[in-house]
Amino acid sequence: MSFSTFTRSIRIARPAAEVFAWHERPGAFERLAPPWQKLQLISRSGGIRDGATVSLRTKIGPLWVRWDVEHRDYLEGVQFRDVQQRGPFAHWEHLHRVDPVEDGRACVLTDAITYQLPFGVLGRWFGGALARRELTRLFDYRHAITRADIEGAARHIAVRPMTFLVAGSSGLVGRSLTAFLQTQGHTVFRLVRRATSTADEVFWNPATGEISPQALRGVDVVVNLAGENIAEGRWTEERKTALRSSRIDSTRTLVKAMAAIKSERLRPFVFISASATGFYGSRGDEQLDEQSAVGGGFLAGVCADWEREALAAEELGVRVVRLRTGVVLTPAGGALAKLLPVFTAGLGGPLGCGKRWMSWISLEDLVGAIYHAVLDWRCYGPVNAVAPQPVTNAEFTATLARVLHRPAMLPVPPCALRLALGEMADETLLSSARVYPGRLQEAVYRFRHENVEAALRSSLGRAASAP
């Protein structure tokens, strides 16, 4: 029986105990899941100690495959091993090991995998190179996330463990934020609209203003990401009402719950309330920052009303951050996920003339910006959650095509977008907003991805030399 091996190591400038502890916390599995890979967690139990299990479904080509793993060989602070019980490989063992270096001031994290592809010789012949390429892609991403998260936490070494309440936790940003906060050692409660089934869930119904009386007890930070998806369906009058009310109702319900806490000392100290760069409307080449006035159009009006509801928390002595988020770049959802099939097929191109400005942010930086806004008192009022280098649509499409090694020669006529999407096309895809993160830069937030190519390569697992 012939086994293949794969080993990847990275130096992390923190003690081994910190790195190992990060892997033991809830959220580590989600943090390490690559955004380009389709994964569905079925169940897990026992953390990473001996006998603990993880079951998931992963998509390989067009097929969903179940993968069951058991943890073994746990040595506290040193190592643990994943052994496949059922899955896509004929054999799979994955050793995670952390070894101290430099008198314990740093450590080396090593992932060592012993595996065997299915179908014997044929599997090795046809899939051997692909398997190694995908493993390299996977662990380059995992190691980059692990090092950035752990070394970044060292900049906030004095931060005490806090309790967060997150609305919109099941969404794209909410899931990533929850996992990140958990690996940083914080407790996260998630607001849900169904009967609660786990200890970390709290019931609410923002449409009726209902929320559990215990929802904010002991909570330090409230993060509101709730709101129906702007990009789903045509904007009928009914749809526009739902888009607006989902944002206003959720914010109003949370502020009301904070007001019900009679002692200011017992209220959350910060309220992060989502908004969007749609606040500025379509402004051509104008350079926009947090001092710029509200624009025109439906989205600008929704954002202004949304933020007005959040501001009511300031009267309660709560610091309010109105987070104006740009286009979030991740293949796990949103605009990029919709563009990928088209560009991968070589059918992508700029929208119209391509001169409209796009203000974007990587998912990792959006999560990081939210956390930074919690910790840094210089973040208050409107905060633009965008990267410092906005791009035109032509620049973005050319960069995405280059990263994917595909052409981007087929421009999309604006009239076609208007025909397909109506008013939504003008206020989203055909809008131009050149927005800069003035307040985040004043608060010295360190972006992981300042330019769009770095963000795309990271989120797609496409190193500069990768085919």
Image (spheres, rainbow, N blue to C red):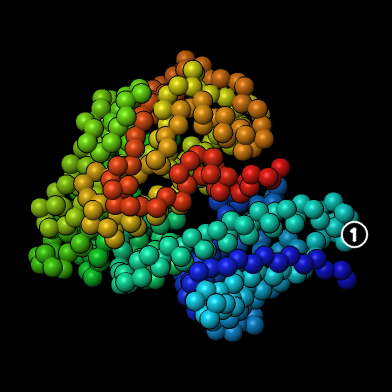
Q: Residue at x 52, y 80 (%)?
A: 104
State which quadrant residue 374 falls in: bottom left
Q: Position of residue 183 (x, y in %)?
A: 44, 67
In the depicted view, which residue is nearer to us: 327 or 227? Answer: 327
Depicted 138 relative to depicted 98: above or below: above
Quickly name the residue at label 1. Answer: 121
Residue extending farthest to the right is 121
Looking at numbered disc 1 in the image, what kind of residue is underneath it? Val
At x 63%, y 47%, the residue is: 463
Residue 199 placed where, x, y %?
Answer: 37, 71
Q: Is residue 146 left or right of residue 189?
A: right
Residue at 51% x, 44% y: name it.
455
> In the image shown, does 367 or 10 lie closer to the viewer?
10
| Residue 230, image x, y percentages | 38, 36
337 left or right of 382 in image: right
- 360 left or right of 212 in image: right
Q: Quadrant of the N terminus?
A: bottom right
Instruction: Pick whichever, 38 or 4, lies toward us.
Output: 4
Dot 1 falls on a residue whose secondary structure is helix
The answer to whether residue 190 is seen in the rendering is yes
Q: Is residue 98 above or below residue 383?
A: below
Q: Position of residue 467 (x, y in %)?
A: 71, 42
Q: Residue at coordinates 33% horizontally, 42% vertically from top-left? A: 437
Locate residue 291 relative to residue 351 in the image: left or right.
left
Tag 1: Cα neighbours inside 10 Å, few (<14), some, or many (≥20)?
few
- From what the image shows, is residue 322 above or below residue 111? above
**Residue occupying the far bottom of the picture:** 75
Q: Which quadrant of the figure has residue 84?
A: bottom right
